[in-house]
Amino acid sequence: MTKVVALGGGTGLAVTLTALRRYADDITAIVSVADDGGSSGRLRTALGIPAPGDLRRCLVALADPSSVWAQTFEHRFTDGDLDGHPLGNLVIAGLAAATGDFAAALEEAGRMLGIVGRVLPATTEPVVLVAEADSGSVAGEVAVAGAGRISAVGLVPRDVHSPPAAIDAILTADQVVLGPGSLFTSILPACLPPAVHAALAATTAQRVYVCNVVAVERETHGYDVAAHVNALRAHRVDVDVVLADEDCLPVGEPVVPVVTRSVAAADGVSHDPERLARALSDLLGWQA
């Protein structure tokens, strides 16, 4: 049985999960909940819950694509007080209120959607993403994303807790996949909670960083693959191998092994799930 854990957020992690369905037997998504914009930000402010938006995307990615519930979870209201809210975000918020446990709410949502695998929040409580950037110190994911060149990110509170199931999944995995996605606002926020960070250092799983196929505007403008690796290492997040598409992003001289494969989708700005699945599957058991 192949056990794979994927960490990150946004649409990048959803693409990875779609890829994992093609070769992994046991899938766990560990998702950043630092988002403070849009529907997620409004629900955080109103209800004091972790951001549900990226979790919703991951639940849908692991659901049967033909499921009416999966399609309904992505329905976004366009009128009245619900304008801008996807139904799935509201369902997750309601389940959290009913169960009194955010991780349990996601488990119930997963059962409702009939997902393959598990979706877990990186933290069990809301966190604020903070950063040092060219423009100075900034707080909040939306502000960080627009702050320009970033030198470091962190979470407030620093001693935030993570679900025990997430830690166990990392420690017992065969492969741990980071990304693709926004390095400073999706991937690192999922890796920095103390227990997750420690588990990533301790696991015997193969740790793969899937590099973006394009630079994220402002956040990583001008980065090559080596710069991505250096940013991970600056936050004490080590990986064993990087998967990159050298036709899309210059490699540079990373300090860890890089495997180059053509994994970009036809649009040139995202990953093709089928190509990504083949590349990640081929990496299992790979050694430099």
Image (tube, rainbow, N blue to C red):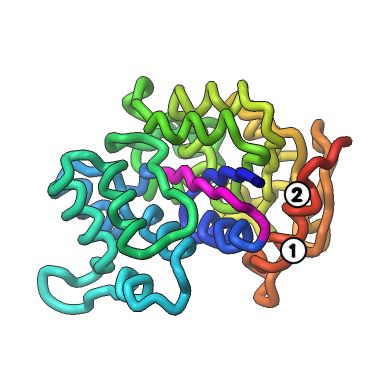
Q: Position of residue 235 (x, y in %)?
A: 58, 27
The residue under the point 69% across, 76% down is 266
In the image, taking residue 83 as reference, residue 111 lies left or right, namely right
Q: Main secondary structure of the magenta part?
A: strand
Q: Is residue 31 magenta?
A: yes
**Taking 64 as reference, is 214 above or below it?**
above
Q: Amino acid at mark 1?
A: Val
Q: Is residue 143 visible?
A: no
Q: Is residue 104 visible?
A: yes
Mark seen at residue 243: 2
Mark seen at residue 263: 1
The residue under the point 83% across, 38% down is 257
Which quadrant: the C terminus?
top right
The residue lying toward the viewer, choosing from 196 and 23, is 23
Q: Is residue 39 magenta?
A: no
Q: Amino acid at mark 2?
A: Leu
The residue under the point 16% across, 40% down is 100
Q: Which residues are magenta?
A: 23-32
